Amino acid sequence: MADETVQTTEDTPATTPEPTPAPSGDLPVSSPNRILLVSYPKIVFMYPTLIASIFAGLYMYFSGATLAEPGSAHIVARVFILIMTINLVVISFDFPRTTSLTLFFLGVAVIAILWSVIRMNADALPYIGSMIEGIKPFANATFYFFIAMVLLALFVGVYIAVRFDYWEVRPNELLHHHGFLSDLERFSAPNLRIDKEINDIFEYLLLRSGRLILHPSNERRAIVLENVFFINKKESEITRMLGAVQVQVRNTTS
C-alpha cells in the first residue's frame, strides 16, 4: 500500500503557479503567455507639435533672433503654426480611407488649378508670394519651450494614468487592471471574439493605432479600446494565442 501511495504521488503532475498581477503603478511587459492592451487618449497624437516646438525653441534660443531683427524667425513660426494646425485637425476629426482619398484628390485638384493660373498669368506667382510674405508671425524661445513643457506634462500624466488602467489577455482569461488599488475584473477568454477597426488613416500612420473591440463570451456588452498602438501586431498576437488554445482543446477532446 505504501508503494502505491508513493507511485501515485510521483505520477501527479506539478502545477505551474499562475502569474500574479503586476503591482499598482507598474505596467508589465508583454510575453507569449500575456498580451497587454492599453487605450490611450488622443493627446498622444500631438507629439509632432511637441517635436516642432522643441526644435523651434532651440533655434530661437541659439539664433538670438528678436522682433527687431527677426531673421528667419518668421519662417520658423509659419512652419510651427502649420504643423500644429495639421496636428489639431488630425485629432479633431476622423479620416477614414474614403475621406482621405477624397482629400488627396481635392489637394491635387487645387494644386493643378493654382499651377494653371500661374501658367496663364505670370503676375499671379509674385502676388501669391507677397501675400505669404505679408504673414509674419513671431514667437520667442520662451513661447516654444512653454508649449513643449505643457505637452510634456500632459504626456507624463497619460504615462502615469495608463499604469492604472490596462487590459491583459491570457490564454484562458481576460483581465482588466484599473484603479490605484489595483482592482481586477476577470472575463472568459477562450471564446473571445475580437474586431479591429482603423477609423483614421492619419492616426494609424502616426502610431499604427486603431480601435480594438473585444467580445467576451459571458458578457453582453462589447469592450471597446480606443487608440491601441500597433493594432495589427496586437490583433495577430491575440489571434495566434487564442487559436493555439482552441487547437489544444480540440486535440484533447478528440
Image: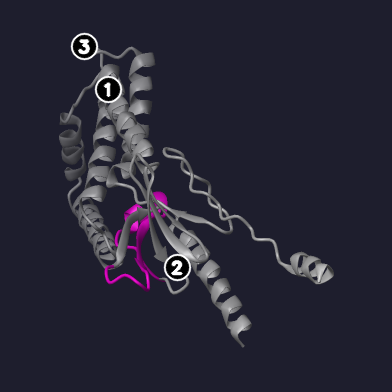
Q: Residues within 10 Å of mark 3 (few under 14, many from 20)?
A: few
* Front disc: 3 or 2: 2
The residue under label 2 is 189
* Front disc: 1 or 3: 1
Which quadrant: the N terminus? bottom right
Check disc 2 and report its element: helix, strand or loop. loop
* Frontmost residue, 75 versus 186: 186
Check disc 3 and report its element: helix, strand or loop. loop
Residue at the bottom extreme of this rendering: 254
Disc 3 marks a residue whose amino acid type is Ala
Confirm or deny contact between disc 1 and disc 2 (CB under 8 A): no
The residue under label 3 is 68
Confirm or deny contact between disc 3 and disc 2 (CB under 8 A): no
Residue 30 numbered mark, or none: none
Does the magenta run of residues contain 178?
no
The residue under label 1 is 146
The mark nearer the N terminus, 1 or 3, is 3
Q: Quadrant of residue 60?
A: top left
Magenta stretch, residue numbers: 193-221
